[in-house]
Image (spheres, grey):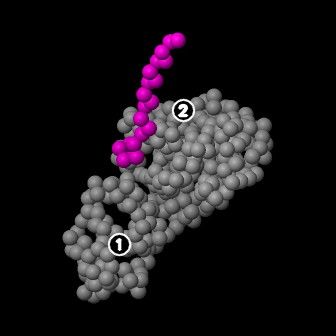
């Protein structure tokens, strides 16, 4: 059980309930610093998450991230009075599964006007997942991932993005993601002056005004174009290869690298590999099949020999990271390095990653060979 609360009565009630049920003592986070450390260290695996119902001196984005790290957790938003009600039987019922709290906001509104208004307001939130260089272990890129503000915690993409796409809101969504990502990245310390990637489906990427449109989104922040990368999602097929080639050239000339996202084993988009993409992102299913599938390894090796810059998604173990290095995969993304993080947690994550994992030390200069 995880408890995020400041009220001592609520905390003590949670501890007493766990004891009476014979469960392990709860992990209690009462300060923003404690929650930040938990986010950065990817603390997860909780079956229950108890949140204090009230104003907490803790950034809500950090609370959201803790909830997201344990997606199967039962979330209970409680006041101290509710936790003590029925002499604690109500709280014990929540923890044992015999009582339930109903939360209204399980999905974003399916109303097009409300969704569009939310994009213009503050309903859209972003998380950033680190991408490291496999050999040096340095942070080289973050991917911007959308979330939707809700109660008691933010919603993940499955709860709102399909509805937006069906309602024709792909471009407003991409515009909002780009603006927020540029703003967030501009506020980071200079030491984290890395690129950020945003997702864009093929129909939007293929529009003639895409370069000017991206520039307009970046205009208010003066975020450098070279630090905004595009991930071509697979939601719609690329039908006109020549047109896509021209689009990639225009974007490259403007400073934007384009990555092909979610590349699968025997992917039907193989014909796109000859286009001028800045890199290929290997789908989680392909990456996690590498230890047991010679066919998957051979495909990745062939792509590496062609000089394709590959990013492996879904990297979860040190053994898999070592295998990627052998296969010539340049970059890695996954829970081994870090979960999607609020922008406020990125500096702390980077500091911890550099100290805990260590960076590849610089090579010592070779002593000059004696002349013969």
User: Which residue is tagged 2?
Assistant: 226
Circle 1 or circle 2, nearest the eye? 1
Question: What x and y, as percent, mark residue 244?
Answer: 73, 39
Res. 18 in view: yes
Q: Main secondary structure of the magenta part?
A: loop
Q: CA distance from mark 1 to mark 2?
A: 44 Å
Does residue 63 sit above or below 261 in this rendering?
below
Tags 1 and 2 in contact by the CB under 8 Å rule? no
User: Which residue is tagged 1?
Assistant: 1
Tell me if mark 2 has few (under 14), some (14-19) or many (20+) residues whose alpha carbon lies within 10 angstroms of its own: some
User: Sequence order check: which comes first, mark 1 or mark 2?
Assistant: 1
Does residue 197 sit above or below 8 in this rendering?
above
Q: Quadrant of the N terminus?
A: bottom left
Residue 326 lies in quadrant:
top right
Magenta-span inclusion, residue 367: yes
Res. 59 in view: no
Residue interval drawn in magenta: 353-372
53 sits to left or right of 199: left
Q: Residue at x 52, y 64 (%)?
A: 108
Tell me if mark 1 has few (under 14), some (14-19) or many (20+) residues whose alpha carbon lies within 10 angstroms of its own: many
Question: What x and y, as percent, mark residue 162?
Answer: 61, 61
Magenta-span inclusion, residue 35: no
Question: What x and y, as percent, mark residue 96?
Answer: 38, 83
Question: Which of 26 and 63 lies nearest the eye of the viewer?
Answer: 26
Q: Which circle marks residue 87 in the picture?
A: none
Residue 251 lies in quadrant:
top right
Q: Residue at x 67, y 44 (%)?
A: 301
Looking at this view, name the residue that lies furthest to the top.
372
């Amino acid at each position: 059980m995880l408890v995020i609360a400041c009220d001592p009565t609520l905390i003590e009630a949670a501890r007493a309930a766990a004891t009476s049920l014979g469960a392990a003592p709860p992990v209690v986070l009462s300060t923003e610093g404690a929650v930040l450390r938990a986010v950065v260290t990817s603390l997860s695996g909780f079956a229950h998450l108890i949140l204090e119902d009230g104003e907490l001196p803790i950034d809500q984005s950090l609370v959201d991230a803790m909830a997201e790290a344990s997606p199967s957790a039962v979330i209970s938003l409680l006041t101290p009075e509710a936790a003590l009600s029925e002499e604690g039987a109500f709280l014990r019922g929540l923890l044992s599964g015999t009582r339930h709290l109903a939360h209204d906001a399980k999905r974003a509104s399916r109303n097009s006007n409300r969704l569009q208004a939310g994009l213009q307001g503050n309903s859209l939130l972003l998380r950033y997942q680190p991408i490291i260089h496999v050999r040096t272990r340095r942070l080289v890129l973050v991917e911007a991932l959308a979330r939707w503000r809700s109660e008691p915690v933010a919603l993940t993409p499955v709860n709102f993005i399909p509805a937006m796409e069906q309602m024709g809101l792909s471009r407003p969504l991409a515009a909002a993601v780009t603006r927020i990502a540029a703003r967030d990245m501009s506020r980071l310390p200079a030491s984290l002056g890395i690129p950020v990637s945003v997702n864009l489906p093929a129909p939007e990427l293929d529009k003639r005004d895409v370069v000017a449109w991206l520039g307009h989104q970046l205009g208010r922040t003066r975020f450098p174009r070279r630090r905004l990368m595009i991930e071509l999602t697979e939601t719609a097929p690329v039908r006109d290869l020549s047109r896509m080639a021209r689009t990639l050239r225009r974007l490259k000339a403007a400073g934007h690298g384009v990555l092909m996202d979610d590349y699968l084993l025997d992917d039907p988009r193989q014909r796109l590999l000859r286009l001028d993409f800045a890199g290929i992102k290997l789908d989680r299913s392909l990456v996690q099949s590498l230890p047991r599938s010679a066919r998957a390894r051979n495909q990745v090796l062939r792509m590496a020999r062609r000089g394709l810059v590959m990013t492996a998604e879904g990297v979860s173990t040190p053994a898999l990271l070592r295998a990627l290095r052998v296969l010539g995969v340049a970059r890695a993304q996954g829970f081994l390095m870090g979960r999607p993080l609020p922008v406020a947690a990125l500096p702390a994550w980077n500091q911890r990653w550099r100290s805990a994992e260590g960076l590849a030390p610089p090579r010592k200069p070779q002593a000059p060979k004696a002349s013969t």
